[in-house]
Structures are given as C-alpha cells and as structure tokens.
Image (tube, grey):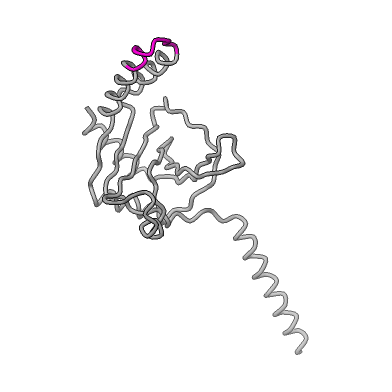
Amino acid sequence: MKTNISKRIIILIICVVTILFVGCSKSSISMNYVKTPDKIYLTGDLHRQEIIELNKKYEETKDYNEKQKILQEIAQLEVRSTIMIDDKVFINKLLNYIHNSRGKDENIILDRSSKDYYSMQFVYNGLKTMDENKLKEGYIITNINIYNGYALFPKYDKTSSNNITFISVKLSDSIMNYLKDYYKSKAR
C-alpha cells in the first residue's frame, strides 16, 4: 500500500514538472514593464504618399541645397501628419491592455507605405532618458509601430540582420478603431 502511494506521488510530481516545462517553453513575453506615458504623438497615413515620393526624389537629387528643401518639405508634411493624444482615459486603457497582453518576439520588416501603419511616440513629462531612478520604475518606450493591428515594440537583438526585432502585441478592434477615428478627426 505504501509503495503504491509513493509511486502515485512520483508520477504526480513528474506530471507537474512536465506541465511546468511545457508551459514555460511556450510562454510569451509579459508586457507589464511598459511605463505609462503622459502624452502620445500619433503619425498616420495623411500625406504618407507625398512623403514617400519626396524621399525618392531626395535619394535621386545630387544638389545639396535642393536636398535641404526636400527635407524641409518632408518635415512639414510629417508635422502636419502627427497629432497629440493626451486623453488620459484612452492612454490608461491602451497601457492596461498592453500590460495584460502577452507579446511575441518577431523579426518583422515594416512596410511604412501600408494603410494600416501608424507610428506612436510616447512622451514622458520631465523625464531625461538616462535618469536611472525613473528607468527602474518601468521600461521607457519612445516609439511603437502600429502595423496591421499589432503594436510593435522595438527590441535590440544582435542576432538579427539589423540588430532589431519586435515584440508584437495584437490590439483589440476597439483600440484600433479609436486610434483610426481619433486620427481622422484631428489630422490636418
């Protein structure tokens, strides 16, 4: 009787350890390290085609002064394509969603000409990038790409060809719709 109980305990321990190892090997990346920004600057597809064409023109141009004019045009279009989101309710909703999500490490090549591409810049008031005490509170994200419904967080990876991979988090339809609608209502 005693050996049967011992065998059952050993089998139970083996099962638990196996489940733990299988669960850990397939686990995704916790996203609760991202620090909540004070503001978000969102750049969308307004003027994107013009910017792409100006970038091509810039590459083909040899004259320094002409290149400077093109760069100024691009900068003006990018400023007009960028809006500020300071809606604290939405920012907290977005970050809570990200914190409760699981990310996947992916090597993605971004197509910035895609209609579903947005660039998000997080702004932290009164924070110097190298302020170690603030950095310990959470990971400071400065740029996030939104691509085909996923938030892509840059991650250094020395094994990738360009030293960067992305941690991707699938965004809900309600968050994507909010971003698109907010952008359309504010972009000029």
Q: Is residue 120 above or below residue 71?
A: below
Asked which quadrant contains residue 118, the reply is: top left
Magenta span of residues: 60-68
Residue at the farthest front position: 64
Q: Is residue 88 left or right of residue 96?
A: left
Q: On the picture, is 160 further left or further right than 176?
A: right
Residue 153 place in picture, x, y as percent = 45, 44
- In the image shown, does 41 or 127 lie closer to the viewer? 127
| Of residues 115 and 172, the one drawn nearer to the viewer in this rendering | 115
Query: Residue 21 location in percent, x, y?
Result: 64, 63
| Quarter where residue 136 is shown | bottom left
Determine the residue positioned at 21% across, 33% down: 186
Is 10 placed left or right of 173 in the picture? right
Q: Is residue 67 magenta?
A: yes
In the displayed image of the protein, which residue is found farthest to the bottom?
2
In-image side of 91 versus 28 (left or right): left
Residue 12 sits above or below residue 82 on the image: below
Which quadrant would the C terminus be assigned to in this image?
Answer: top left
Number of marks present in the image shown: 0
Say which quarter of the image contains residue 99. Answer: bottom left
Name the quarter where the N terminus is drawn: bottom right
Q: Residue at x 32, y 22 (%)?
A: 74
Spot occupied by residue 175 in the image (x, y as percentages of width and height): 33, 44
Asked whether 165 falls inside the magenta stretch, the response is no
Magenta stretch, overall SS: helix
Tell me which residue sits at (38%, 13%) in the image. Answer: 64
